[in-house]
Every structure is written in structure tokens, then in C-alpha cells.
Image (tube, rainbow, N blue to C red):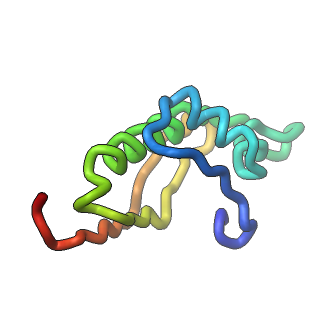
């Protein structure tokens, strides 16, 4: 959905879960997860914000060894916000520092 919607928010790593939640709230996906009338249930975004925060910590800690990663897709359960990463790709520089 993020790619289809060209919907993103950017920040430098690391970010806290609170900062990640605020970033998410600025996106169309974040607004949809907030619910819409009786058509879209309100979904807790805290688990997704924690995932983003944890990934940003990993990125900051290992930026010299892992310059990029891709989590795709990330599934979010309606209501509870439970997060599942279906596939993850981490690209390594191949060297040790």
C-alpha cells in the first residue's frame, strides 16, 4: 500500500516509538488506521511504531555493515495492530569494521 500510495514519512535514525507514531500519523495509512466512521475500524498503531523504532535503532547501530533493508510486506491486524513482517531483506557490505 505504501508504494501504491507513494505515502511516506522520513526521519534520521534512531527514532523513538513516540516519534515513529507521530510520523505514522502524518501519513494517509496512519489516518486510515485511526479509523473512519463505521467503515474502517480504529487500529492500534503502537506495535507498528515500536517496529519502526526498533528498526531505526538497528539501522543506527549497524549502518556501516547493513546500509539498506526492506521489510515487505508488513501486515497489520485490524483493531489490535499486531504486526507481522512477512519478508525481510538486509543488504550487507560484506566487510567487518
Depth order, front residue of 83/78: 83
Q: Nearer the viewer, residue 31 or 13?
A: 13
29 displayed left or right of 61: right
Residue 10 shown left or right of residue 56 in the figure? right
Seen from this angle, which residue lies furthest front? Answer: 97
Residue at position x 75%, y 42% in the image: 26
In the image, taking residue 83 as reference, residue 30 lies left or right, namely right
Report x, y in % for residue 43.
Answer: 65, 37
Q: Is residue 78 above or below residue 3?
A: above
Asked if residue 3 is positioned above or below residue 64 in the image, the reply reads: below
Query: Residue reaching furthest top?
Result: 18
Please tell me which residue is depicted at 26% across the width and 58% down the height of the picture. 64
Q: How many marks?
A: 0
* Residue 53 coordinates in the image, percent (x, y): 45, 38
Residue at the image point whose x is 49% and y is 65% from the top: 73
Residue 16 in the image: x percent, y percent? 48, 30
Of the 4 image quadrants, the one containing the C terminus is bottom left
- The single residue placed furthest to the right in the displayed view is 37
Q: Position of residue 92 (x, y in %)?
A: 24, 69
The quadrant in which the N terminus is found is bottom right
Instruction: Give the side of residue 6 with respect to residue 92, left or right.
Output: right
Amino acid at each position: 500500500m505504501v508504494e501504491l500510495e507513494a505515502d511516506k514519512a522520513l526521519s534520521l535514525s534512531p527514532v523513538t516509538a513516540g516519534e515513529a507514531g507521530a510520523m505514522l500519523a502524518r501519513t494517509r495509512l496512519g489516518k486510515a488506521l485511526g479509523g473512519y466512521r463505521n467503515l474502517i475500524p480504529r487500529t492500534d498503531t503502537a506495535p507498528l511504531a515500536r517496529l519502526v523504532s526498533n528498526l531505526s535503532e538497528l539501522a543506527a547501530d549497524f549502518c556501516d555493515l547493513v546500509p539498506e533493508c526492506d521489510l515487505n510486506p508488513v501486515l497489520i491486524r485490524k483493531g489490535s495492530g499486531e504486526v507481522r513482517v512477512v519478508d525481510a531483506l538486509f543488504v550487507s557490505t560484506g566487510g567487518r569494521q
